[in-house]
Amino acid sequence: MTALISKPDFPKNFTWGVATSAFQIEGASNTDGKGPSIWDDFCRVPGTIADASDGVVACDHYHLWESDLDLITDLGVDAYRFSISWPRVQPLGSGAFNEAGFAFYERLVDGMIARGLKPYLTLNHWDLPSALQAQGGWANRDTVQHFVTYAGEVARRLGDRVTSICTHNEPWVVAVLGHEVGNFAPGIKSRAVMLQVAHHLLLSHGMALTALRAQGCKASLGIVLNMSHTQAATESEADKEQARLDDGKGLRWYVDPLLKGEYPADVLEHFGTDAPRVLPGDMELIAAPLDFLGVNYYFRCMASAGAPWDINASGHDITDMGWEVYPPGLTALLVRLHRDYSLPPILITENGAAFQDEMVDAQVHDVRRQSYIASHIAAVREAMQQGVVVDGYFVWSLLDNFEWASGYEKRFGIVRVDYDTQQRTLKDSALWYRGFLEARP
């Protein structure tokens, strides 16, 4: 497994990191003036979270941030990708900012810099302020301007110290799971609303980038998309057409506006009267130049026009999320993006796997996660050898944490968290990652 790759195979300036998000680890949901988010609200709806849990305490990172940063430093990574909780720094999503909330992130960023870690900041990792949802949330175009104002204030305070600012993490998830499927916050089930939300997310991204550049923000600016390599389950024309549609809805619907300034015509036709309302000038704003494109990859997608594809027949390992482990899909995805688009530098902003870990003699022998990470790093190297410019790789996740609708039942961390004691334990995957990173070129 470890023979697949070694760190000297990558450029000296390649960035290695770990990633988390605010709602999943911070806790302190009612502390120091923080306002409620849509995920605070969603957790209170019976039946929405698998174990009926919430993010009130989570990993208590709000209070344990210093020791968590020490832990990150001990791993030997270059960078830490984290998110800001919008309602922590602006409780209503508009109006007054919360100084105590900003003070936390000031301490966090300064703590990273003091430890030699590069801060990679995400503005929206799904925890929209509840007050904005009460006014329609992302379906309301006013939220776009509220986000731009919020982004500008974050950049004004932190933009000279953070390495990178990402506007949105996985707008597909916010739109589709939150507003069409409805199993994520805010729990709406409408395709038309989903599409308007997706448009407003992309629009707010482009407008924020333009505003941040106008105010002289020094950080590298971009967006993070979850993407899969989609292929037909069989060679039938029906399956091939289904694969093109699935790829259109999941990938091209987001990448085409960002990099080509237009929605894909075939997908627009498919959506028909549910298509979003797009005002003159919107597409030009969405296509603001990117300093980087973040790619979150976990699994490939197999498209079938008939019976659903049997994942268990693939012969590959299956994670605790029910996702197939398929590293060649990451290579294929990156090479395809390189072929079809004029790309900015790519960052692999999330990659990892959930497995049922067990603590044995104060150790966690997570061989499958270790294999997952090593094989996907090798897949990144293969894509780079084929000409794709990739500047960094971030493991998801640093810590076991609140895994959204799955609650605390799924563990993605390379560090185990005992939620009763908040004890952190480096799993074998973390020890492997640290050893891999010690082999500096």
Image (cartoon, rainbow, N blue to C red):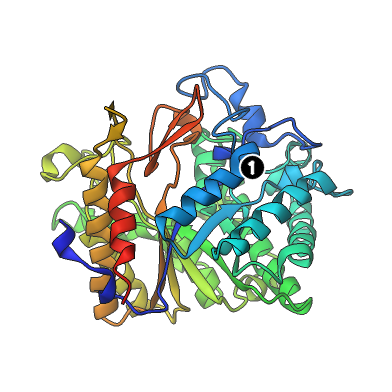
> Could you tell me which quadrant the C terminus lies in?
bottom left
Q: Is residue 359 left or right of residue 137?
A: left
Q: Is residue 83 left or right of residue 172?
A: right
Local secondary structure at mark 1: loop
Query: Identity of the amino acid at label 1?
Result: Asp
Dot 1, crowdedness within 10 Å: few (<14), some or many (≥20)? Answer: many
Tell me what residue is drawn at x 21 percent, y 43 percent.
368
Residue 436 percent across, percent down from the top left: 28, 61
Residue 286 percent across, percent down from the top left: 62, 70
Tell me what residue is drawn at x 54 percent, y 63 percent.
117
Residue 58 percent across, percent down from the top left: 56, 31
Up/down of 66 relative to 52, above or below: below
> Could you tell me which quadrant the N terminus lies in?
bottom left
Q: Is residue 55 left or right of residue 324?
A: right
The residue identified by callout 1 is: 127
Tell me what residue is drawn at x 50 percent, y 24 percent.
421
Task: Confirm whether residue 166 shows in the render.
Answer: no
